Image (cartoon, grey):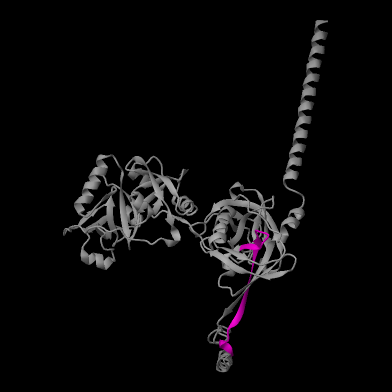
Amino acid sequence: MQSQAVTIARAQVDWTAARIRLALLTLLTLALVAAQTITAQARPESLAPLAEKISPSVVNITTSTTVEGRTGPQGMVPEGSPFEDFFREFQDRNNNNGEGRRPRKSSALGSGFVISEDGFVVTNNHVIDGADEITIEFFSGKELPAEVVGTDPNTDIALLKVETDSPLPFVQFGDSDQALVGDWVIAMGNPLGQGFSVSAGIVSARNRALSGTYDDYIQTDAAINRGNSGGPLFNMDGEVIGVNTAILSPNGGSIGIGFSMASNVVSRVVDQLKEFGETRRGWLGVRIQDVTDDVAEAMGLASASGALVTDVPDGPAKDAGLLSGDVITAFDGVDVTDTRGLVRQVGNTTVGKSVRIVVNREGETKTILVTLGRREEAERAVPVAQPGETEEAEKSVLGLTLTPLTEDQRAELNVPSGTEGIVVTAVDEASQAFEKGLRAGDVITEAGQQKVTRLSDLDDRIEEARDAGRKSLLLLVRRAGEPRFVALALEDE
């Protein structure tokens, strides 16, 4: 009986375990079905409803430019061709008639989008640059002439205006900072002059920089071709998160690498163009460079971050007390990681605003209040200093052959009046100095963040760095007046 009871108990346990496994399998199946349903909801089967909603706000842009006529059909045949004489005779005949020099009209196509019912249109600056006439074609086929309100070549943005008696369909800017890599996007425009076209893809990357100071591009694989320039990049809510500006391509066609200027940059530019007809960016008035690992070690910094001030010409920063060698670690309450981020943040700050800047100066943290100027009006000035004494000597150290700066060298090297320092006359090509770009003709004005006018000054800075346990020495080097910091490893004694 006891054995039979044990058998029954085991059977009950097995049956219970089987029911639990079945329940878990059922729950797993339901979870997978729910996940598929959510995915299907996140990516609609068709983008047609969204495209239909936003298409009326997208426009084609045609420009007309008068260009000088050429003197003839140059380049029609290669030099040495048996037809060369024939075409030269044809060219001379046209030139004598004056036909080859007649001005002619050149047309170009691009895209844009309406941002207000009263007719403001955004496009790329390069789409309308130099145009004599600009025509806007709407999705309905209606055409209207447009006038330029303002342009910003730095971000390649232009604001146009058309006059209309009836409200126009328009779209709004979204928050480009909320766009994530992998999000679905739609590009719209006039690719290759084929008319209104829609392409879809995803955000491939964020915060791309091409060549501009204020670049903040969204990279996308949505097809963008010639003619798409100036058109909008939409998120799935129908908001503009970018302006299609450039592609990376070996053949001029889309290979899935396109760039759209982020809407948070564009919207600020558009607001200024609408209000002032021009941009008004903040200006701090410093020259800066990134803090590299060796520079951080030479300065005793905890990390290689921030923006290192290399020069402070006349301007807001100098008036506020910023110094060459300061490392800017925070601007207006935001941490500074590199020079690119600082330049963008300063440019986006209102002209005339007083901001707090946190700097690391000789190991201590200081907060300085600076009232920003306007970048567009800034004039670069050279700091003036009294010329120091010179000494006739030559020294080789750290892979450099050095002499004090003489007046003859100042004229020969085009060194600004008032600049003091020691001159590099030769660089050992096997040295770290050569590897880091130092060359004959460079002028070293500071070492260890202190001025040097004599070779003995450099010896003192090297000795001080060794006594402090530093492995490298920070030099401020000027070439053609442009300063930069270079950290060189100290030689073993």
Residue 441 appears in the figure: yes
Q: Is residue 117 magenta?
A: yes
**Left or right of 480: which side holds 246?**
right
**Left or right of 246: which side holds 315?**
left
The span shown in magenta is 99-122
Q: Nearer the viewer, residue 357 or 399?
A: 357
Q: Quadrant of residue 60?
A: bottom right
Residue displayed at 79% across by 10% down: 6
Q: Residue furthest front?
A: 165
The picture places residue 20, in percent across and down from the top left corner, at 77, 23
Numbered marks: total: 0
The picture places residue 410, in percent across and down from the top left corner, at 25, 64
Q: Nearer the viewer, residue 465 or 359?
A: 359
Residue displayed at 70% across by 60% down: 57
Q: Quadrant of residue 387?
A: bottom left
Q: Nearer the viewer, residue 104 or 85?
A: 104
Residue 153, placed above or below residue 100: above
Residue displayed at 55% across by 55% down: 268
Residue displayed at 36% across by 43% down: 360
Q: Nearer the viewer, residue 2 or 326?
A: 326
The picture places residue 433, in percent across and down from the top left corner, at 32, 54
Assign the C terminus to one quadrant of the image: top left
Q: Is residue 332 magenta?
A: no
